[in-house]
Amino acid sequence: MRSTPTSRVSVAEAIHLPPPFTLVRLRESGDAFAHACRIAPKSGAGTLVCVGRFDLAEFAVVLEPGEPLGTARRAFYAGMVALTDALRAYAPPHKTVAIGWPDTVVIDGGLVGGGRMGWPTSAREDEPPAWLVFGAMIRTVAMADQGPGVHPLASALDEEGFGEAGAVQVTESFARHLMRAIDSWQTDGFASLARDYLSRVPRERRTVLRIDDGGDLLTRRVGADRIERSVLAKALVTPSWFDPKLGGPRL
């Protein structure tokens, strides 16, 4: 995927972000998430790193939470709400943008990408981390050799009818919606953000989903007392949607 020609779309198109953000652009071969994690200790909150690719919207933003790591990871949910809202802004009316807990973004059943989160390896669960990084990749253009049906579980924005929405538009939209998601969290509390996130997660019939104060997903079947816990910190260690060999979303 990294070697795809860039002639179809200009990757030098200007990106306009709201004032709190500081833009850092990398060349096509760069890694936005890794770079953001490297520079986070000095760059500060609001630094947004993006990679100039035509086939993928790839970016990562530095956050500086004021609470212990054990609860600060909940910022991941704000990032996912912002990411899916960014896509909904350009989605055709009949398209469903959904989340597979915790990190996968799916459009009408086709995986287009997802989010991930990093923090300092030395950070303690009971102390505020020096930084967090929320990173995302969204497949904007299907590869030339991917005809319809070749990868039935994967998709791209161009295949889903998103028109001219490319990496620049998705990145700009994400930044705006991240500000709204964080403001909503601060104003209405985490429970409101959690409900917003869970409204995008498909669920089995007769199941109740809830996110607890630590960010873990609790699943209970109607009529049963047993509650299944899915631990957010463990789930974020390895992004479920990312293929290291491709350097992007799974096919």
Image (tube, rainbow, N blue to C red):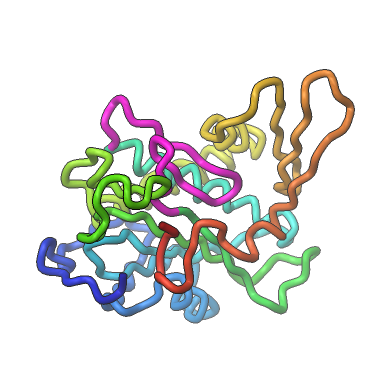
Query: Residue placed at 25% from the left, 76% from the top?
Result: 3
Q: Give the side of residue 240 with respect to residue 33, left or right.
A: right
- Could you say which is closer to the camera, residue 89 or residue 17? 89
Residue 248 coordinates in the image, percent (x, y): 40, 65
Q: Quadrant of the N terminus?
A: bottom left
- The location of residue 215, given as percent across then percent down, is 70, 47
| Extreme residue toward the front, this view | 150
Q: Which quadrant of the view contains residue 236?
A: bottom right
Q: In x, y percent, where is residue 99?
A: 51, 41
Is 94 included in the stretch rendered in magenta? Answer: yes
Question: Residue at 55% across / 30% down in the picture?
Answer: 199
The answer to whether residue 65 is left or right of residue 177 is right
Q: Quadrant of the C terminus?
A: bottom left
Q: What is the x, y in percent for residue 176?
A: 36, 47
74 is higher (above) or lower (below) than 35: above
User: Which residue is located at x 47 percent, y 66 percent?
Assistant: 243
Compare residues 249 and 90 and report the one nearer the observer: 249
* Residue 54 belongs to magenta span: no
Residue at the (29%, 35%) spot, across then down? 91
Specify start and end residues of the magenta stretch as a single range: 91-113
